[in-house]
Amino acid sequence: MATDPSDCLFCRIIGGELPGDFLHRDDVVIAIRDIAPKAPTHVLVMPREHVQAAANLTDEHGAMLGRLFAVAAQLARDEGLSEKGFRLVTNSGAGVGQSVAHLHFHLLGGRSMGWPPG
Ligand code: AMP
């Protein structure tokens, strides 16, 4: 898993160097459809800032996270998930499945899901 921002897949998508199916873009947060969806709706919501993972978050990221969660909630409404529900999850560390070292939240919905995840 690449940890250098200059070699970061999502930084390259955010910067326009690689293509992405964008659902949202603002100064702080972007959202793209996942290239290999695990549910009928599978969107990745992430900061423009290169933060490696949730493990690296501090109080200084509060405003960014507020924006990120507001965008995720709006996208869930836009995708028609408000009533049936959705899951918003992040993997922090390769040991639990993080494959891209740029903080991102998976917005998943449109099918039933068990808990806890396997
Ligand atoms: P994670 O494994 O939690 O780090 O999530 C990374 C996600 O990025 C996976 O669900 C991948 O399917 C997704 N992904 C990988 N490459 C791309 C890409 N070029 N565009 C959109 N999503 C991608």
Image: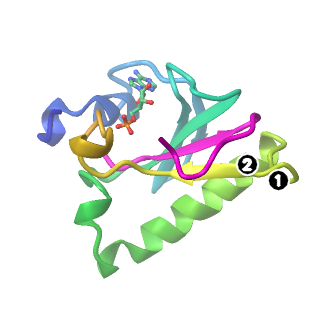
Image coordinates for residue 33, horizontal then vertical, percent: 57, 29
Q: Which residue is mark 2?
A: 76
* Residue lying farthest to the right in this orientation: 83
Image coordinates for residue 90, horizontal then vertical, percent: 43, 51
| The magenta segment | 102-118
Q: CA distance from mark 2 to mark 1?
A: 6 Å
Badge 2 residue CB within 8 Å of ligand 1: no
Q: Residue at x 25, y 62 (%)?
A: 55
Q: Residue at x 41, y 47 (%)?
A: 104
Q: Residue at x 57, y 27 (%)?
A: 38
* Residue 114 inside the magenta-drawn segment: yes
SS category of the residue bearing label 1: loop
- Give the quarter of the image for residue 59: bottom left
Quick check: 94 left or right of 65? Answer: left
What color scheme is it?
A: rainbow
Q: Residue at x 44, y 18 (%)?
A: 19
In the image, 95 versus 42, the foreground residue is: 95
8 in relation to 92, above or below: above
61 in relation to 17, above or below: below
Q: Earlier in the sequence, mark 2 or mark 1?
A: 2
Q: Amino acid at mark 1?
A: Ser
* Residue 104 inside the magenta-drawn segment: yes
- Image disc number at residue 82: 1
Image coordinates for residue 100, horizontal then vertical, percent: 29, 35
SS category of the residue bearing label 2: helix
CB-based contact (under 8 Å), mark 2 and mark 1: yes
78 in relation to 2, above or below: below
The image quadrant in which ligand 1 is located: top left
Q: Amino acid at mark 2?
A: Ala
Predominant SS along the magenta part: loop
- Give the quarter of the image for residue 23: top right
106 in relation to 62, above or below: above
